[in-house]
Image (cartoon, helix red, strand yellow):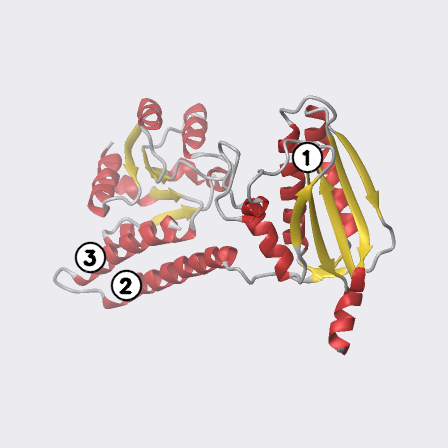
Amino acid sequence: MGAQLQSKFVAVVDDDDSVRTAIQGLLKSVGLPARAYASGEKFLDSGHHHQTACLIADIRMPGMSGLDLQSRLNAERCPIPTIFITAHGDEAMRLQAMRAGAVEFLPKPFDDELLIESVRAALER
Amino acid sequence: MNQPIAASLTNARTCLRWLDGDTPNVEEARKAAMRIVQDQTRAAEIISRIRLLFKKDTAQRELVDINEIIREMIVLLHGETTRYLITLRTKLAEDLPQVMGDRVQLQQVMMNLTMNGIDAMTDVDGTRELVINLQPAADGHHMVSISDTGIGLPPERADRIFDAFYTTKPHGTGMGLRISRSIVESHGGRLWAGENTPRGASFHFTLPTVVAQAYTAGS
């Protein structure tokens, strides 16, 4: 890991508390501490998106969806390599996410190894 | 409910990661295991809440004004009666004693009987009239009657309509009258049907009011 990662971190955005803490715990176990947010709005309000090296987000959330968040970040010229994990994925959604620059689109429940690899790939970018 | 269960899987894998390798981190593994306990507790709570929704005896009893329930129903029915050109007539006695009952369940009964009456008339030529009556009955009971001028009851055993899964509608569940009778009986009343003249059906149900309950308490 390079010096540039010291000021940047991984962000997890999901409205479900269990999912947030589970992903945070998983990333911590491989030396990738993550910050968690209960919504896209909270993530944007925090201002942390400028220091986020990789974003893991759910798609379907009350309020701002994961895809909306991705659009907002792109519009603000703050594109963040994003991994979507969702219980409700379909092909059309996957296509939309990938076209907007997503790194990966994982169905829930996800393979932990696959998530870690995707995060590492996102951080390499 | 899938979320806490899926999260448990991640937490379990994380726990194993902390324990594998040269120096297992027991503290972190314990934290991961604790998250699983929390996830499972949450999943269990969701399951029991769902069970509660389907439990038969979760009746919430309170003092209910039948007159008021009927008036609320009339407001709800306005769209349907207008749409199907049905005249709605009511004769509702005032100042009746209240019923100790489950408001939601009684609304359900009213909804079921009035909608059945409306459905019975949608294909009928001639007068379409839905009549709702509320009158005091014997022994401190109320009687509610809902009559329509629709297709009427089946000629054979009219009582069959209260059987589970009996329906004349293509997408009917056949449970409406069965459930309505169940609800009325659990309140200590009776629900029955008869023919209306010149055509159509009438449904009647009785409910004991707090006055009737005082009688039975005393005897």
In the rendered structure, are the residues bearing label 2 and label 3 in contact, judged by CB atoms less than 8 Å apart?
no
Single out the residue that lies furthest toward the left. Answer: B22
State the CA–CA distance, disc 3 to disc 1.
72 Å
What amino acid type should be assigned to the residue bearing mark 2? Glu
Residue B68, given in percent of the width and then of the height, sits at: 78, 49
Q: Nearer the viewer, mark 3 or mark 1?
A: 1
What amino acid type should be assigned to the residue bearing mark 3? Arg
Q: Nearer the viewer, mark 2 or mark 1?
A: 1
Q: Which of the two labelled residues, at mark 2 and mark 1, occupies the earlier sequence position? A: 2
Q: Secondary structure at mark 2?
A: helix
Residue A101, given in percent of the width and then of the height, sits at: 32, 25
* Chain letter of the residue beneath label 3 in the structure image: B
Q: Which residue is mark 2?
A: B28
Which picture quadrant has residue B115? Answer: top right
Which picture quadrant has residue A111? Answer: top left
Numbered circle sitting on residue A99: none
Q: Which residue is mark 1?
A: B200
Return the residue nearer the eye: A70 or B147.
B147
Same chain letter for marks 3 and 1: yes
Residue drawn 22% across the image and 36% down it: A121
Single out the residue that lies furthest toward the right. Answer: B95
Q: Which residue is mark 3?
A: B17
Residue drawn 62% across the image and 32% down it: B119
